[in-house]
Image (cartoon, rainbow, N blue to C red):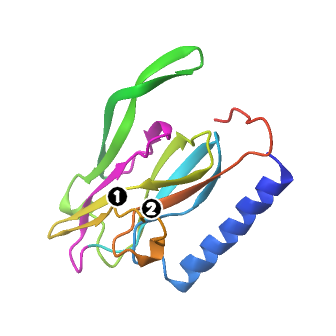
Amino acid sequence: MSLNTMKKIAAAACLTGATALFGTASAHVVLEYQVAPAGASYKAAFKVGHGCGASPTRQVVVDIPAGMRGARPMPKPGWTVEVQRDKLAQPYTSHGRSITEDVVRITWTAKTPDDMLQSAHYDEFVLVAQAPEQAGTVYWPVRQVCTEGRNDWTEVPKAGQQLSDLKSPAAALEILPTGGAAAHNH
């Protein structure tokens, strides 16, 4: 990774930290780290800062954006994990194998009412995946299902629209170009 790419990642991380510190991003489900180098392994930690009003969160559903490959969830004590796979329109090769299907959705569901995320508490739901090779922004639609109600964080900005203009924005990840030949990371 080039020094210029590392500087961009560091600057974006500082901006992300400042945004979280001042609370503008805390009302939505957002990613802890909102930038990643193209083609690199990426740890997506979805920060859930509240329920649906006073109602606790019983389920978190994350749709994997096109181009993100090989998503694997981190198990959570007290929660079951369901991984949904689907056929790929465009298969790819990984470690000498042809990959014809991949993960398209990961769902965490609380096992009991005591395991649910209470509205007054904070938690994270984590997965890893390989970022796309192309720079740009990918959006992660997240559905937060509560005992009463739900929050669908699924809106994607249209051309000329800012993410901050949306009422229920999807979590955004900026994929930064690599400084040269992309390294294969795990």
Q: Which quarter of the rendering shows the C terminus?
A: top right
The vertical placement of 167 against 155, above or below, is below
- The reply to whether callout 1 and callout 2 are in contact (CB within 8 Å) is yes
Q: Residue at x 67, y 36 (%)?
A: 185
Whole-percent x and y of residue 134? 61, 43
What numbered label is drawn on residue 171? Answer: 2
Q: Secondary structure at mark 1?
A: strand
Q: Answer whether residue 26 is visible to the viewer in this image.
A: no
Name the one closer to the observer, 93 or 70.
93
Mark 1 or mark 2: whose residue is earlier in sequence: 1
Identify the residue position indicated by label 1 in the image: 142
Q: Residue at x 64, y 39 (%)?
A: 39
Whole-percent x and y of residue 125? 42, 56
Question: Which amino acid lies under the numbered mark 1 shown in the image of this protein?
Answer: Val
Instruction: Determine if the magenta segment contains residue 56.
Output: yes
Dot 1: within a 10 Å radius of its alpha carbon, few (fewer than 14), some, or many (20 or more) residues? many
Q: Residue at x 50, y 41 (%)?
A: 68
Question: Which amino acid lies under the numbered mark 2 shown in the image of this protein?
Answer: Ala
What numbered label is drawn on residue 29? Answer: none
Q: Secondary structure at mark 2?
A: strand
Q: Which residues are magenta?
A: 52-77
Q: Quadrant of residue 95?
A: top right
Q: Classify residue 11 as left or right of residue 111.
A: right
